[in-house]
Image: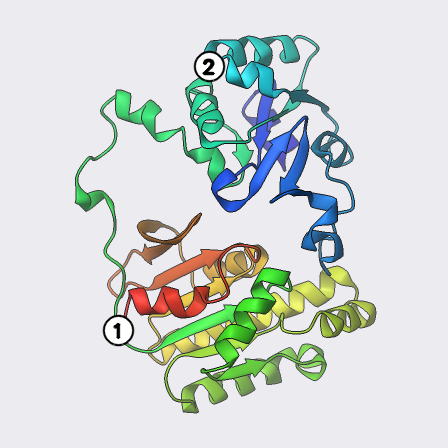
């Protein structure tokens, strides 16, 4: 995807920086750390969908790309935006290239944001966006009033969809299960997606209060589904089930949805026909409430499976009760 977009835009150099220090993601010498350990030593090492056995992002991206991949070190970052631009120029002299940029604190991302002023395509985690707004603010292109933040959708019943099998999401599911109802997507459900959707919608409609539909509660179930259907097909089936459940329950009146899992979030947004979102208040680091446009707005909280504290689901809904 990075190769295709960079090529379509005629961009010789593309910056990659998935660092987010406030959420424990830092990059040093092109190695991605989660907290105090390498990515390959974190919970992502045994992730059932995307196991990460190498923390070196030059190697990880290089294995996926036809372009050269280089590292821009912390020394260049700490010398400021001009030094970063010079480093980018040096890297691009050899032709099309992707650059992994070190960042271990927010100030690094602010410097990177200034250096990227005018670039049309960059990629990374939410942290890379920290330094970008100032570029637009200098031009008078950003609103400075509270109207810039969308008011969240409040009240009514809410739905939580957990498609991630990450360690953080499993902890969030179990925290929710202590005091709220949960419908678990089982192996038999994955084998019969249409029946699974009908069962989950019927259960949620009849349950009291807010509900959670979970496909990530048990990593062993995820692995058995992968062995039976293949990794991609098992994931596609789960995403389709959860997305169809979301669409069905919105039709019954659910107006707030919390989604855990990047692929699941994309599937839900597509199933609901969402084309544009307004950013609302922050729930946790890197995760805001958003509001869809249209005559009947929906409140959506879309998060990576690895983000948020164990009580994330309850906290998100308490904010909009």
Q: Quadrant of residue 240?
A: bottom right
Q: Secondary structure at mark 2?
A: helix
Q: Which mark is residue 81?
A: 2
Which quadrant holds the N terminus?
Answer: top right
1 and 2 marks in contact (CB < 8 Å) = no
Q: Where's residue 213, x and y in %?
A: 53, 76
Compared across the picture, whether 211 is left or right of 254 comes to right
Closest to the observer, 72 or 264:
72
* Closer to us: 110 or 270: 110
Residue neighbourhood size for the residue with mark 2, other residues' Cα within 10 Å, grouped as few (<14), some (14–19), many (≥20): many
241 on left or right of 283? right
Q: Earlier in the sequence, mark 1 or mark 2?
A: 2
Rendering coords of residue 8 (x, y %): 57, 27
Question: At x 68% / y 73%, what residue is drawn?
Answer: 218
Q: Which residue is mark 1?
A: 155
Q: Is 124 in front, or is 29?
A: 29
Q: Position of residue 230 (x, y in %)?
A: 79, 64
Asked whether residue 177 appears in the rendered view, the answer is yes
x 51%, y 39%: residue? 20
Q: Is residue 184 above or below residue 244?
A: below
Left or right: residue 18 compared with residue 279: right
CA neighbours of label 1 inside 10 A, class few (<14), some (14 to 19), many (20+) = some
Residue 243 visible? The answer is no
Q: Residue at x 49, y 25 (%)?
A: 108
The local secondary structure at tag 1 comes to: loop
Picture quadrant where residue 34 is located: top right
The mark closer to the camera, 1 or 2, is: 2
Q: 271 or 152, which lies in front? A: 152
Q: Report the label total.
A: 2
Q: Residue at x 66, y 8 (%)?
A: 93
**Residue sitting farthest toward the bottom:** 206
């Amino acid at each position: 995807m990075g190769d295709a977009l960079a090529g379509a835009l005629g961009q010789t150099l593309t910056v990659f920086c998935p660092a987010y220090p406030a959420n424990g993601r830092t990059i040093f010498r092109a190695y991605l750390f989660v907290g105090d350990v390498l990515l390959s030593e974190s919970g992502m090492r045994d992730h059932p969908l995307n196991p990460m056995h190498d923390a070196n992002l030059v190697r990880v991206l290089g294995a996926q790309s036809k372009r050269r991949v280089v590292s821009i070190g912390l020394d260049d970052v700490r010398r400021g935006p001009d030094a970063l631009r010079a480093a980018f120029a040096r890297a691009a002299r050899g032709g099309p290239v992707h650059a992994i940029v070190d960042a271990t604190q927010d100030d690094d991302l602010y410097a990177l944001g200034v250096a990227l002023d005018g670039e049309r395509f960059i990629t990374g985690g939410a942290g890379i966006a920290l330094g970008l707004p100032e570029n637009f603010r200098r031009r008078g292109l950003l609103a400075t009033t509270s109207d810039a933040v969308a008011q969240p959708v409040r009240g009514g019943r809410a739905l939580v969809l957990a498609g991630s099998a990450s360690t953080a999401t499993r902890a969030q599911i179990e925290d929710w299960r202590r005091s709220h109802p949960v419908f678990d997507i089982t192996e038999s459900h994955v084998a019969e997606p249409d029946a699974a959707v009908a069962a989950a919608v019927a259960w949620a409609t009849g349950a009291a209060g807010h509900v959670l539909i979970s496909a990530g509660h048990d990593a062993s179930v995820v692995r058995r589904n992968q062995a039976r259907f293949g990794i991609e097909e098992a994931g596609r089936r789960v995403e389709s089930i959860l997305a169809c459940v979301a669409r069905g329950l919105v039709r019954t009146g659910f107006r707030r949805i919390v989604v855990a899992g990047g692929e699941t979030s994309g599937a839900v947004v597509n199933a609901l026909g969402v084309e544009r979102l307004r950013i609302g208040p922050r729930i946790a680091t890197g995760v805001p409430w958003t509001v869809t446009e249209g005559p009947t707005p929906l409140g959506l909280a879309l998060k990576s499976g690895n983000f948020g504290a164990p009580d994330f689901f309850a906290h998100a809904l308490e904010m909009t009760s």
